[in-house]
Every structure is written in C-alpha cells, then in structure tokens.
C-alpha cells in the first residue's frame, strides 16, 4: 500500500456544506456471476449517501475477500481490485465522513471470522444502545478494532449458538435498538434486515434471476434491475441458493421512516419508502408557497439541495423559477486556500450568482434546511452581491431543533441555530429580508402522511421514537443467550 | 513520479457524452503575492473547459517553475506543489482530452528557454496553419516535443530578434492564422493576446491591485476580482511592473465570436463576449419554443446541458418545466464495465429518469445539440422507459453539419449525423416522436446578433471565416523575419 | 487510501530466494519525545526481518494512533504520517511476506479496544496452540479480523479481569505456547515479554533516559542507544513512568534460542542471544573448513548470505577468499518478466559471476543453507558458466530436514530437499562436484554451545522443544479465568 | 498522472554518500520482439549508474512511444507501461540525481519530432561546449525544454539536411566536444556512438539474433546476451534491418577512458574498456598495500565502495580481511530525521560497526576516495567507537583535486578536500591515525596502463584532455551546415 500523503491540514479547507448528512449506502447481491461488478455500479449510484470510504466484500462460496479504501467509489476501485473480488455474491458500502472519525479501519463492510465462519456486514443507521452493548461485550472479553457501532452486531452474532443462520442473526438483532438497514454476507447467503421502525430505506430488486438489496431504487435503475418491493420494517430476508425467505424476528413497532430522506438525503430519482423523492420535494415546495408566500419576482434554488422545492414553490406561487446561482460540480470535498486568506472562499468555490437573473429582482431563495446558518448568510450575501434587491429565504422543512440519533450526521443541539434562536434572530443572522420555514404539518402533508403516523420527525419535533440509552440498567441486556432462549 | 497504472482499457469505458468540447481554459495574473494560488483557484472555476490535464507556470522574476499533470485541477495540485510555485506572476491552463492524444507532454502551459530567456505559453484555440508552420519550422531545423500546435508559436517567438517583448510576440503572431486566446509569461511580464476575429473569449480583471486575464468571468468571481473588460479581438495586452499596455498588432478582421460558447461550452454564470451565458440560453430556449412548439405536457431538460434552454422553452411555451432526468454528479470520465456486458450502461451511469415526473406525459425533451445521435437515442429510450407517452426532442441550436477548426473538439463531418441525414432520418434514428432544431436566425437572435455580424457559426452553416490552409503556398510564410520587417 | 494497483501476477515474478525467512522484527520505546521517529528508525534497522508490511502505533497517554501499510518502512512512512503519530511511547513492527498471506489486515501492530482500554501488540514468533485457542475463543463468541495468530493473545488479554496490567498480560500469556517476543503498548505503559525458551531475540536499550526494547542490537546502534541487556527468556518487563519493572510469569523452561538467527536471519553487526552474529558466522565457516575441506583454489561466497561463513572458511582452510559473484542490491522483491520467457531470469536478476575471478578455478562455493535446491543449482551453473573448473559446495549449517514451528517461514517437509534426498542425490541435483554440510556438532560449537543446552535446532535435528498441539484436549484450556485464579 | 507529494525537505535527509557519481547508463536494442522488456531488464542491471529517473522509448517502425519517470527502474515501470511500449526496437536510460536539478523534464531518453521524423536520444557523458552551442542555437531561434546538454545534440541533428541517417548524425556530432556515449532511436534504426576519446564505456552485444548496445557488460549478462565488442572510441554504429554498419565520423584522438569507472562507478562484474572491474580494484588494493603499508591487525573495507580494494590490500599486505562495517542495503536515498536532531544519523543509517571484529584492533580502513572528507570522518569515528585501537585510512586512488567535465557529478574544486588541504591536514580532519593515497602511477599500473596512454585521470592530475570552452570564439561553430559540407 502506498501510504496517504495528505496536505497540511491548515491549508486544506473543506468546501462549505451546511447540511445534515446521511452516513451510509448499502448494496448486496446474491447469485450473479458479476456480483462484485454490479455492487461497484450500485455503490456508484449510492455515492451521494457517503463519500468518505467505499468497500466491497465478495464471496465465492468458500472465501470472503474484501477491498476497501478511503475516497469515492471511483478512487477506491480499479479493474484489478474488482477482478480479485471473485464469486457470485457481494455486499458493498459507502460511508460518510464525520469530522473526527475519518479513519480507514471504520470503513465497511466489516469482515470477521468466528465460530460460524466468516461473515461481512454493511450497516446504514445508528444503534442507540451501541455504547452500552460495547461496554457489556468488552466486560465479557470482546475486543474492538474500530469505533463503528456496527462491530457490536458482529460480536453479538458470534456469540450466538443457534444452528441456523437466520436464528443466529435474529438472536443478535434482538439486543440492538435503533436504526438499522443491514446487509450480511456469509459464504453462501445474503441477509437483509431492516429495523421495525423502518428508519432507513432498504429495497429488494432482481436482475438476471438474482436477488439484490440496496438503499435506494436508483441503484436498481443503473443496473437495469427490476424493483421488487421494500424490505419491510422489521423484516429479515435471507437470500441463498434456495431463493428468498422472509422472517419477522422483531416485535412490531410503529413506522418511523426518516422524513429527511425526502427532504434532502435521497436521490430525487429514487423511490424511498414507496414514494418518489422528487415528487415529495415538489410538494414540499408547493406547501411552502401556500404557507409562506413572498412579494417577489423570481424563485431561485440553492443548487442542488433546493432545486426540487424551488420548482414546487414556483408552481405553487405562480412566480417564475430561475437559476440565479450556478454550482461548480467539479469541486471536491476540499480545496487549498491561499495562505494569506485575503478573503473567504467558503461557499464561493461551489456557487456563483448570475447577475442577469438577479439584477434588480426580489428573490425568493429556496433551500431545504438551515443548520448552523453561516453558509446561509454567505449565500444570501452572494445573491445580494449578484444584484438582488430583496432576498426572501424560504426553507422547505421546519426548523431543525434536535440532533438525529438514527444514522444521520448532525451537529450538537447547541450548534443548531434554530434550537437556540428565534425566527427573527435567524433571519437577522442570515441577513435575509424575510425568512419562513415549512410547518411540521406541511412537511407531513408533503410526504402524504398528514396524520404523522409513518415518519420520524425527531430533528424537527424533538420527539424521539426510540430513546437513547443513558445507562446499562435501562436495557437489561443479556448478551449470552441461553440455549432455547 | 509514480508512474500511471491504468486499468485494462477494454474494461474501462468512457461515460457517454455526445457534445462538442472546448479544448482549453486559461488564467494568468501578474503582481500578486499569491499568484499561483489564485491561478489554481481560477483553474478550478474553468475546469469545465478542460479535464484532461492542468498546469501552472509561475515566475519569481528570475526563474519560471512549472507543475503539470494529467487529471483534474484537484488531482494535479496539492499544497506542496502549489507552495513550490513561488513568485508574483503565474499562468495556468486546463486542457480537454481528445481521444488519441491524452498524453502528458501535451499538457500546458508549455515552458521553454530561448535566446530571449524563459517563456511559458497557455493557448485556448486552434491554429489553421499550424501544420504548415510546423513543416516549415522543421525544415528550418526546429524540433518539436509535443503534438500541440501551440509549440509552433513559441518557435516563432524564439526566432524573433526584435528587442522589445511586445514586438517579438507580435512578430511571432503575424505568422499564425486561426483562433487563439493566448497567455504568455516571461520572467517579468504577462502577455494576453486574442486573435482579431475574437473566436475564443478572454477577459481582463483586477484583484488587490493586480491585473489578471482569463477565459471566463466565473474565474474572476471566485477570487472576488473585478471585471475590467474583454481583451479586445486583435488586442495584445502587456502587463508588467509598469502596469498594463495595449497594442494592436493585427490588421482588423470582422468579429467571429464562437456562438457555441453560448450554446454549450461556457459556464452559465459567466459573461462571454460581454453577454451572460445563461441569459443567452434562456433566449435560445424561448426562440425555440416560438419556432418549434410541441403538443406536450411538460418540458424536461437533458441535464445539465439542456437546463437553460429548457427553462427558456418553458417560459416561451407556457408549458411546465420539470426535472424528468436526474444526473449523478459523482460520475467521473470513465467507469469499469462488467466483463460480460450484460447490458449497455452507456448514459445510464450518468442519467436516470424520474417516473413520477414522466409517467403518462407528453414530454418536450430539450438538449443543446445532437452530434452523433447515439446518446440522444439512449436518452429518448430512457425517457420513454420512465413512463413518457410521447417524446418530442427540441434542440436549442441548428443542426451541426461541420467540424470546428477553431479550437473545439468535434468529430469528422462524416460522423455528424446532421451532416449526412435528413431531419426525419435523425428523428427516426433517435426514436423521437418529433424533432426540431432552432433555426440559424433564431440562434443569432438569441445572442443579440440578428444580423450575424459578430459570431462564427461555421459548425452550423459551413461558412468558415478563416480558411484552413491546404498547402504552404497559400500562406507564403516568411519565418525568418528580416531586421526592420 | 489509494488502492493498490498491482501488475498482472502472471508477469510479475519473485526474485529467486531460497532461504528460511524470519517473520518479524519489533521495536518499542517509552518516555521519549520522538518516540515514533525513533521507532521508524529502529524499523529501518530491522527491515531485514520482514519486508511485507510495516507499522507503528504511538501513544500520547490518551489515544493510541496507528499507521500501517504494505511495503518497506521507507514506502509506508512519510513525514506526514510520522508527524501524526504523536506521543512519548510507540511500538513498531516489520512483517515478512509469506506466499498466500500478503494481506493488509495482517499487518502489525494490531490495535484493539477492550474493557481495559486500548492496547497494541507487535509479535515476533509463532504460537503452537494458536489454532486451538482460536477455536476455543470463537466457540466462546470471539470474532477475528485477521488470520494472524497474534490476535489470539489480545483476545486472551481482553478476557482477563485482573486489575493490574502485569497480571492481565501474565494471565493471557499463561495460555499460549510457542515462540514469542512480544511488545504491548497501552496508553501509559510498554510491556516486553519473551517466551521461557527464549526462541526469538529481544533486547533492552536506553537512549536519552528512555527505555526501549527491540529484536536486535543493530536498532540500538542506529539511534545511538545504549545496550542494557536481553529481556530474559520467561521475563516480562513493564516500562512506564515509574521506570522498569521485571516479572517472571512463566515456569522455567530449558533455553532454546533459534540457532538460525546466527546462521542466517540476524544482521551480522547485531548481538543476538548475547553473541555477535558475524563472529558466529566466521566460526561456522571455520568449523566447516575443518570438517569439510576441499581441493580448491578459491573460496567464493553466495552474497550476501554466505559472506561471513566464506570468510571463516577461507581463514580455516588457508584458501584465498574471492568475490566471484556480484549481487545487484537495487533489486526489489519482484520484477517483470518478458512475456515469452525466452530464458529464465531467476537468480540472474540478483547475482552475476565475475569471470576474472572464476576462470579456470576450482571454487569452494559457500552458502548458509539449501532449502529446495533449485536456486542452488542455478548458482552452481552460473559459477560454472563464469569459468569455474570445479564447484565444491559447502553449507555452513546441517541439512534442513524439518519445518520451523516457532516463527520462521519454511516450506513443508516434503519440499525440503534434505528431508527427502541423500547427500549425493542433493549434490547431483545441484550439479556440484562435491557437497558437504556442517555437522550438528560443528553448528553448536560455532555458537559456543557444544553441549547443545541453549539452542533450538529443530529444523536440523527434528527435535522440537515445544510440541505442536494436535487437538484441544491436549491443552485443557480454561479461557475464562476465575477471579483469583 | 498523480503529482509527486514530497515530504518537507527540511525533514527528509539524504543518506551520507560522499562519492563522485556517474550520471547515466544507457541500453538499446534493435530487432527483438521483447525490445522494451529487455531494455527494462538492462536498465535494472545499470541502475547503479543513475537512480534519479529512468525511461524507455520504443519504436514499432511507425511511432515512437516514451515512458519516463522519477525514481528507480522498479518504481517507474510496471507491467502496464511496459506493455504499452510496443515494437522491435527500444532505448533506455537511467539518470543520476544532482542536487539542484532533480526535475522530470530532464529525464531521458529525450523524444522529439523534426523534419527527419521522430528521434529519441539517450546520453551518457557531458559536452564541454554545450553552453556555447546552446547560445548559438538559441540565437538561431532554437527553443529548449530541458536544462540537459543532450537536447543540443537533437537540435543539431534536426538542422542537418543530409539525406542519410548516418550522415545527419555525423554532421550533428561534428559540432560537439566532450564525453558522449550516445544511443539514438529512429523509427527504423538504432545508432550507437562513442566520442573519439572513449571517455565513457559502451559495448555491443547480441541476443536471439538482435544487436544491442549498453554501458556495461553486466546488462548483457542479465539477459544472457553475448558480448560482441566495445563500440570503438570515435565509432558510430548503425543497426537496422540490414544489420550492423560501422562508421568513423570523427578525427582520431588519443584514448582517454575514465579511470574512475574502474575505481568506483562500474559494477565489479562488468568488463569496462575491455577489462574486468573487480580485477582492477583488487589490483588497486594490491598496489596500495605495496605503496602504503600499515602496522595493523586487520583490513576493513568501507562497504561496498572499498570492498574490492580491501581484498586486494589484504592479499598484498598479508593482513587478514574482515567485515568490520556492515551496510544496510534497505536504505533508500533519503530518510526522515527526528525533528530535534538529537544526534546526527548521517552515515549511521547505512553503516554499523561490528565490535567483535574491531575490538582492540589496529584497523586499515580502505575506501576508494575521499571527496569532502566529512563522511570519512564519521566512518573513522564509527570504527573507533566500534572498538578499534588505531585507524589507518588507505585510499585506493590518488587525491581528487579537480572536478570532472566529462559526465561525472563532482563538487566544485573548492569543496574537494584534497584540492585545498595537505595530506596531513586531511588526515587530521578525518581523525585517522594515518592516511595514504594510491599514487598516480600506482593507479595507472593497476589498470594496466603504466604509460598512461589510455586513461583520463583529470580529476586526479588536473590534466584535462578536452578543454572546457570559455567562450564561443574558441570554437568557431558553424551550426548551419552548407550543402555538401
């Protein structure tokens, strides 16, 4: 391996991006002669769900072989490494980079060996009781080689003595709480599991007679696979040579789909929770136009995050839609700043205003959310510098007042501007002429869940459907399952 | 250097992209302590003009130092290499990759030494008499180390015995014919030159008291530089410690701005030839709507090339604008195909249809051009597979019937579908329900040149403003200038 | 990480090298502000003990940070990666590449987290009961992320509930059998342990007031550290802020130093088991001259392995020493073969005969051992092609008739030519005019152990001092220690 | 290309190496299906002649394709790059790194295009009139893209109008003065030329019916090629489909073989100037023993440079030869120093004393030369620290008092300790108990040239066989040859 030779961190600067971020995308396929190649393509389609690292583990029925690395799918894999991933089954994973944790040993899938044989795991989500489980496992003598909560699941699996794969997986999952869409790969089976709340998406597809499971339908489309259905919340699907078998290892829970998948994370062309994402975004914008009209001349999205909602707002308001900000898609995650920081490049490296569109206009500026507010202020200033007479910011979701504990990278509560400031303070901070958010009701209506019975909106409402464990007593773990238990 | 280790070419496949391509972007600055850093940022903004290679040469008044490489700006430069580019002046270049010619020694800027001292050159454009000049120079004993026509210019410069820099540059330029926006860097001067027809753009800016020149204004915006004016067609601007001096070394010629810069090449946020590109594209779409209406339900762009025109078409036609195709911006220039090519991935790796938008709709599909037609057919099929009932293709420029000789990478005439097929044959080939192009008049009206007095439209009209040299006799070159000549 | 991009394995060929190979070198230091840097230098000095991978884990008292990679020390580390390894304590490891196992996840040190906190381990040696322990640990629910037997030790450590570090380490070591020179690094201590037989070397040193432990004294010399003493067989040394404390956790065993360290593995300038290696090799050669004289004109070493013994043979025999074979030290581990394999390059890429030395001579060719015999035959042919009239092969150790189970990479017994062929068959196979090995007695005399009371000679004698476990019953493991047990 | 990412130069430190260095090795072959592969292997064998960069240009009869890079042959080439170098003819080059000039564009072979078609050049040597020729060529309009004097030769070639290749090459060579062993490759011919003084070596070989030319015979041996003869001083050999033709384009000059090839540069197993190098070194040592005996116990070489001479000295003096210093062959050209430079690592990273050999001994320490003296002092100190009672330094060549102008990298005269200090001052500086050099006569005797009629000894004697041009008038160049001239 050639060791990474990074630049001086003081000179490299991250491109401004003030969004919540999904932490992972997963893809797995069983029974296809090109399993690793299709997984690679599937990860390509899921790249938006994580750009820190990518990895694939493939099985040829005897051995499981991994290839992982830091960077985009395109950087991590080449012809050589794909060719080495022989076999008819594979799972893959893309991972999002959170600030302090960009380390290679956290890259997934995790591949381990245990008394049940080798097994690999790719995880999208977050366990609320991972720390407790880890403490308990460590107390029982387990060692951990990553800081990922997913490693906990494999320890639980390894401690199961059930004979059948499905029973062993089910036993291990009976201990974990939280959000998880999981893919397991053993020598001769692919297992797809989704938590009973259905926090994160997971769908089943079929191509050339082989079954596959992945985070979003856009990965099916790329490889021309047929969409079969969602892995149901609380369902465990085992795919092997006998075909596909479905299990229900969890007690039923109320549905809690992550509404932010529709607001921001998922690709607009995907079906997520059975609903097209772009359709949701158009409706979010339309609802926003109804709730928060503006005396303005033109609707301008912050590209690409505000695109769908801006189109919906334009339709809802009757105002013309216009591209007042252009995004440079060649920008990577970082760039090298001049030493003397003559000026802040921040968001400028990515966005540029179009004077011919903005000059003299009263602009409705649409984005999906405001997290810390600093980037929003830079964009408002940019739009004004581009000639806009007035800038009316409209946000296609409610104020984000709480962190996510279910697999989304969010700042702490104290860093969420809407958790600590009034609407008018935020407006003043971002220097907008007016500011409005979509209401909680509007949000739910836009995803066709007016009663709020299917979605998790914890980051907007503060109502967390699964509590975060505070100490071990709450959970009464019994890691060492009894025979027959 | 770590040598490049490419994949098996048979397995790497280029992502489908059927457009004419600009061959270069240039950026130069004089008199700034962060010259190389600002040039790096400028190249970032100009990345769309060329993704094959990038390079910078910087001058500290004594030495000129180069750093070049294959790949995107982000790949070629790191903190270390930028730091080594010391000095107050620099020029940079991004280059487009044409099929057979992706070789490192063609990367620019070219840096040479001659009796006048070291000099570097970055060139956007194409010389029509380069082959003749090269033959004549070789006959006179010159050696060439690249296949780039730009090297010819440096040979001519080196053969000049004029005392003053401006005279030497002017003398060398008096021999060349064609399209050129050039930046020269010597130890103590930056020279920006534009051919008398003004084929390719070149603008002047100012930041922190330093002058700079670059292809498009979006590079000025990124570094917060002020737009001064265009380098005039036929103008040579010398920037040194004395400031900026303007010369007019060429006999006047009629203006021939490349209209394709507005149709496709330039960034929508740039001013090109004094006019905003997005404004032009909106107007191209509006003219198209007037000339070629469609009985349809929705206007869908091929992203990103058809975006501006689709918005204009929607406005012109009154039909709703919709995002019926989603583009994956993480896709690089190539990807690794499965070995058994179970199916063609072609355009699929980049685009995906949105069923919720397209289902049951009569779609007007907007793109800027059709070159070979194969990609268009794939996209039409994709839109139809996405549920569209009818697909009416509308192109925001006239049929492309001839290659470009002025700095654009185009296929040969025989490969241009519009050069060899009737409108209806093309429609049948791309499997559209109807097909219409913008007229030549509409094109010119959209760029505010109804009389056609300022633009080159050779690829649409076949009327080439500067003939391509067939043999040396036509040009009567006299490479060895007489003293006093 | 930039993924490895290997060449076609069919075209890359390993340079001929027919020796037993040591599997590891270790280096650790505590209480030095440049801990990681000195470890890096120490690994440089120990590079001959393993060239597959290199790694360092450093502790700043709070966090343990790893950097590992495939390749030589020089390839794996750069300024950036060393700078990131902050802290006053560090351990490092170099690892030898065995054929099927060149995988990155086996690189050491292994860093894990457990209920005792983070700990890293570097291991030189081999456990004879690793497979059994692994089976038992897996049965108890442990998961393994490498195929290295060293991971077993960390599992045992993690399962200990003793309060003090030394007790926990001792408890874990009480289960393992075989050869081990170990370095553990915790947040605030360095632990060095050597098995009771003393199979592999491990010495203590001191520099700038800080203690260090490493495989060979050549690593001390490089950083100008003082040699303190060996870590005694069966000794556990704990180094922390309180200084150095010594423990004796194992029942005493007879000394069994690996005699092959003197024959081939260790660097000639090192003290190993308290004795200079070059002195041993000279004496091996001298004994060989006494036991197996030859009617010859000149003594020629196979460089570099036969150098010391050849000098000793020359002294013992009175024959002149000569450099009849020259070694190209720029050769790496592999090279790219021509496709049509017009001829075998084998050993030629590394060695070349000197005709002026060999022409017409009766040559005594000295090497340290013959493993498979194929390389020896190539060298004998090469010497003859270089002009030698006769080639008398003399080997400075006895015939290698058995594999090593104590940390040396050896072929299986059936591939050891001396295990399956008579002396004369070997002579005929390697095409020598005569062949003689040093006797077992001569070997022991040369390392000043005439009674054979201190060395393991299992690979020569077939007498294995620690039996290899055949099944679990033999060992009666009790992995889950009782409190107070 | 992935750009080079070097470490902070302040932290990287070159390994101490105080020798003159050869600047290049060349290898070329014509008419072999594996031309590039054999050239790659040949460069492997010639790696000691240059480690900065390596390159190959291959011809398939139509195109010439280059691959070059910084680093060792092993780093620059992989299977992919070799495979791309198709064709039946190739030339290769390894280049030595001089301090300020480690730039990629100086890597050879240089490949250019001119009116005669493409041609590549690899050069071992140095032109004494390169600067003058460059000035004159630049005055005549030539441009230069490297700082290498070899580019001058290609300019001269390109300016020739002779019809036949041999005449054009000869015409260009008629202008150059100095040391040159050259290989040219055109589409259909390989040309090997050696200057009339024969400064640098160049030999002809044959393998599988194909002719080849290379710097040293060790490259022939590696690929099992037959040694044919030297390219004669002043000879130009043209190899093409018609076979091999010999020309004599130069007026005869007295032979001036570089004696330092025998003293240090060439590989001991090579024939150079028709004589085995190791034989010369043994004789240098023997002469030294006769001229400068020492009251000592043991003869110790500085490895590897002093090895041959030390063996000769031991034979000549009757003193025992011993390995008192061990060299670590894994060391690259640089290593990373600790930040606080607690102590100097200098030569220690490469050499280590063996106490068992040195303890209490009076040591004769043999090296080939002393350049600046600083490294010698470190080694003397190291030997003394290793226990030596006395250190008597003996140098197997005369004092180096002048720089080389014929292709060797040497310091300036003021930095040569022997040019500015008396013998006793040098002895004191290096802290030796005694110091002696071989006499000039002894040197010549050792290379069988007692009369001094065949060798250049300028660096020892100050007598330069070809004067270095001071200004253009001395040379009366006439670059533009007349027809018929």
Image (cartoon, coloured by chain):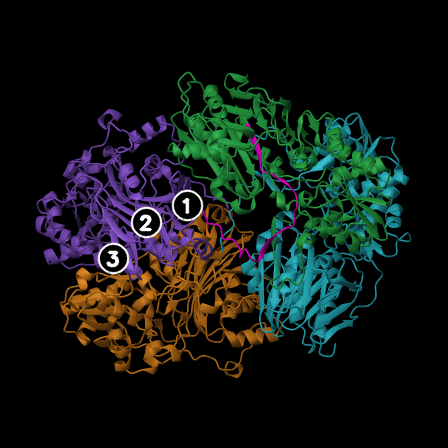
Chain colours: A purple, B orange, C green, D cyan
Q: Which residue is mark 2?
A: A190
Q: Is residue C7 magenta?
A: yes
Rendered location of residue A204, percent (x, y) = 25, 53
Please identify the quarter of the rendering in which residue C164 is found.
Answer: top left
Residue closer to the observer: B39 or C280: C280
Horizontal placement of D75 versus B349: left or right?
Answer: right
Query: Which is in the foreground here, disc 2 or disc 3?
Result: 2
Q: CA distance from mark 3 to mark 1?
A: 26 Å
Give the residue displayed 52% in from the left and 30% down from the top.
Answer: C91
Q: Is residue B158 left or right of residue A395?
A: right
- Expressed as whole percent of the image width and height from the top left, the position of residue B198 reads 38, 70
Question: Residue extending furthest front?
Answer: C473
| First along the sequence among labels 1 and 2 | 2
**What residue is shown at x 67% (from left), y 45% (from top)?**
C420
| Mark in the foreground, 3 or 1 | 1
Mark 3 or mark 1: whose residue is earlier in sequence: 1
Asked if residue C460 is positioned above or below residue D283 in the image, the reply reads above
The secondary structure type at the circle numbered 2 is strand
A164 or A170: nearer the eye? A164
Confirm whether residue B252 shows in the render. Answer: yes
Write down the residue under mark 3: A355
Q: For mark 3, does the 10 Å Cα neighbourhood hold few (<14), some (14 to 19), or many (20 or more) residues?
A: many
**Same subunit, tags 3 and 1:** yes
How far apart are the two marked residues, 2 and 3, measured between alpha carbons?
53 Å
Residue bounds of the magenta highlight:
C1-28
* Chain where mark 2 sits: A
Whether labels 1 and 2 belong to a single chain: the reply is yes
- The residue where tag 1 is placed is A338
Prevalent SS, magenta region: loop
> Tag 1: Cα neighbours inside 10 Å, few (<14), some, or many (≥20)?
many
Task: Confirm whether the magenta stretch covers residue C370.
Answer: no
């Amino acid at each position: 391996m050639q060791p990474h030779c990074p630049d001086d961190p003081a000179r490299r600067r991250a491109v401004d991006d003030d969004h919540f971020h999904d932490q992972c995308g997963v893809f797995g396929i069983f029974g296809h002669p090109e399993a690793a190649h299709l997984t690679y393509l599937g990860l390509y389609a899921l790249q938006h769900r994580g750009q820190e690292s990518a990895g694939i583990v493939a099985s040829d029925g005897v051995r499981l072989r991994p290839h992982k690395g830091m960077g985009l799918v395109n950087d991590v894999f080449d012809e050589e490494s794909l060719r080495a991933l022989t076999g008819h089954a594979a799972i893959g994973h893309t991972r999002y980079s959170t600030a302090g944790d960009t380390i290679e040993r956290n890259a997934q899938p995790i591949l381990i060996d245990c008394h049940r044989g080798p097994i690999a795991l790719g995880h999208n989500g977050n366990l609320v009781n991972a720390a407790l489980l880890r403490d308990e496992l460590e107390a029982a003598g387990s060692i951990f080689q990553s800081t990922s909560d997913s490693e906990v699941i494999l320890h639980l699996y390894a401690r199961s003595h059930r004979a059948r794969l499905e029973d062993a997986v089910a036993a291990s999952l009976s201990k974990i709480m939280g959000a998880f869409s999981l893919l397991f790969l053993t020598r001769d089976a692919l297992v797809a599991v989704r938590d009973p709340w259905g926090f994160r998406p997971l769908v089943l597809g079929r191509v050339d007679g082989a079954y596959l499971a992945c985070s979003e339908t856009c990965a099916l489309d790329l490889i021309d696979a047929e969409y079969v259905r969602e892995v149901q919340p609380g369902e465990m699907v085992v795919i092997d040579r006998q075909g596909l078998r479905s299990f229900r290892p969890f007690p039923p829970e109320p549905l809690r789909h992550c509404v932010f998948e529709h607001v921001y994370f998922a690709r607009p062309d995907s079906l997520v929770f059975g609903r097209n994402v772009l359709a949701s975004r158009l409706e979010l914008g339309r609802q926003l136009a109804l709730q928060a009209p503006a005396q303005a001349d033109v609707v301008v999205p912050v590209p690409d995050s505000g695109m769908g909602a801006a189109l919906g707002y334009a339709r809802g308001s009757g105002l013309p839609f216009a591209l007042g900000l252009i995004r440079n898609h060649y920008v990577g995650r970082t760039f090298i700043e001049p030493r003397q920081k003559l000026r802040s490049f921040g968001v400028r490296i990515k966005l540029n205003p179009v004077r011919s569109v903005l000059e003299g206009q009263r602009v409705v500026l649409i984005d999906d959310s405001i997290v810390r507010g600093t980037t929003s202020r830079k964009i408002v200033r940019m739009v004004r510098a581009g000639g806009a007479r007035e800038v009316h910011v409209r946000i296609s979701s409610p104020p984000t007042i709480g962190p996510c504990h279910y697999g989304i990278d969010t700042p702490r509560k104290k860093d969420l501007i809407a958790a600590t400031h009034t609407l008018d303070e935020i407006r003043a901070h971002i220097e907008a002429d007016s500011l409005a958010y979509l209401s909680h009701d509007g949000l739910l209506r836009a995803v066709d869940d007016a009663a709020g019975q299917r979605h998790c909106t914890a980051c907007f409402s503060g109502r967390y459907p699964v509590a975060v464990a505070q100490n071990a007593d709450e959970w009464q773990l019994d890691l060492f399952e009894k025979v027959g238990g």
